[in-house]
Amino acid sequence: MKAVHFHRFGGTDVLEYGELPEQPLGPDRVRVRVRAAGVNPIDWKAREGLLAPLMDTLFPVVPGLDLAGEVIEAAPGVTEYAPGDEVMGFLWPDVLGRGTCAETVTAPVRALAPKPASLSWAEAAALPLAGIAAYQSLVHRLRVTAGETVLVHAAAGGVGVFAVQIAVALGARVIGTASEHNHDFLGSLGAEPVAYRRNLTGNVRALAPDGIDAVLDAAGRRALRDSPALLAPGGRLVSVADPQAVALGGGYVFARPDREDLTRLTDLAEKGLLRVELAAVLPLEKAAEAHLLVRDGHTRGKVVLTVD
């Protein structure tokens, strides 16, 4: 099979595109023909070696955690999926090695869900990791309820776009920080946009003088540091961008593959309550360009690689 891979840590120049052997099929896994693979910040961080202190690495490394594709083979004990089924998923490996930027990949059934018929391959591949991060933050950690005011930092980014829509679906009022050129877009999702480069605190307080009930930070840095002062009494704070949120009295969310959560995202998409914003769709062999786009950090929505 053809795959994007690297044999050492470094810049985008270490990325290669060529043949690798297929993975063996484990007892709880299916083999998926990948149609599209999402690109996330963790991919360039893995390539640059920033994850090396946290987990073992098995070279050559195939990057990628998100996928959408068709099941082509199932292990004998698997009853959830059969060849021909269209699936999407988020694969978090115990060892950094074989990811989703390849023609085929084996995936545990617990990390997959049926692909929404309403989404293209590229849209379905963009949803799992960022969507789960947003869903687990809002539903499981912040426990957002109808009528609450939610602040989403980096609301036009990969996680933020889904967080805004999920919070709206939960019945919350949503304020989203973003660059001014994304304000009309956020308004179309149901959020009240605010600028963050100047007077972030004042801008938010002007919209919510009584304080914010729940903050989901997907930006880190200054936005995170300013957030505790914006909370209403009893307000909650989590970050998917920076573990320092814990020291500020909040929590850190590290997205975990979960079939039930992924299925709930599928339901929202099928009901028209969750749309996917694609910043760029590139062929698999242009993974280096995709990494640069994501590393730049100014894309609206997700970057996806498609597999021919």
Image (cartoon, grey):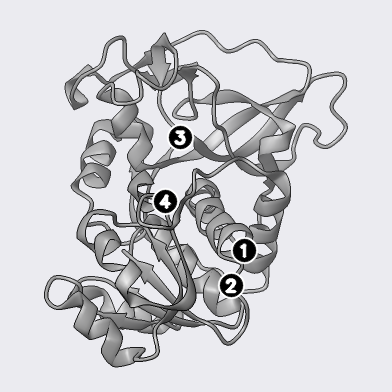
Tag shown at residue 139: 1
Q: Amino acid at mark 2?
A: Val
Q: CA distance from mark 2 to mark 3?
A: 37 Å
Q: CA distance from mark 4 to mark 1?
A: 14 Å
* Left/right of residue 189 with respect to residue 35 in the rendered view: left
Residue with the mark numbered 3: 307
Secondary structure of the residue carrying numbered label 4: loop
* For marks 4 and 1 on the same chain, the one whose residue lies earlier in the sequence: 1
Residue with the mark numbered 4: 240
Q: Is residue 255 visible?
A: yes
Q: Are marks 2 and 1 in contact (CB under 8 Å)?
A: yes
Secondary structure of the residue carrying numbered label 3: loop
Instruction: Indicate the position of residue 258 as horizontal and vertical percent values.
Output: 67, 44
* For marks 2 and 1 on the same chain, the one whose residue lies earlier in the sequence: 1
* For marks 2 and 4 on the same chain, the one whose residue lies earlier in the sequence: 2
Q: CA distance from mark 1 to mark 3?
A: 33 Å
Local crowd at mark 3 within 10 Å, few (<14), some, or many (≥20)?
many
Instruction: Indicate the position of residue 48 as horizontal and vertical percent values.
Output: 25, 24
The image quarter in which residue 201 lies: bottom left
Local crowd at mark 1 within 10 Å, few (<14), some, or many (≥20)?
some
Q: Is residue 87 above or below residue 100?
A: below
Residue with the mark numbered 2: 144
Local crowd at mark 2 within 10 Å, few (<14), some, or many (≥20)?
many
162 vs 51, nearest the viewer: 51
* For marks 3 and 4 on the same chain, the one whose residue lies earlier in the sequence: 4
**Residue sitting at x 48%, y 64%:** 162
Q: Is residue 155 visible?
A: no
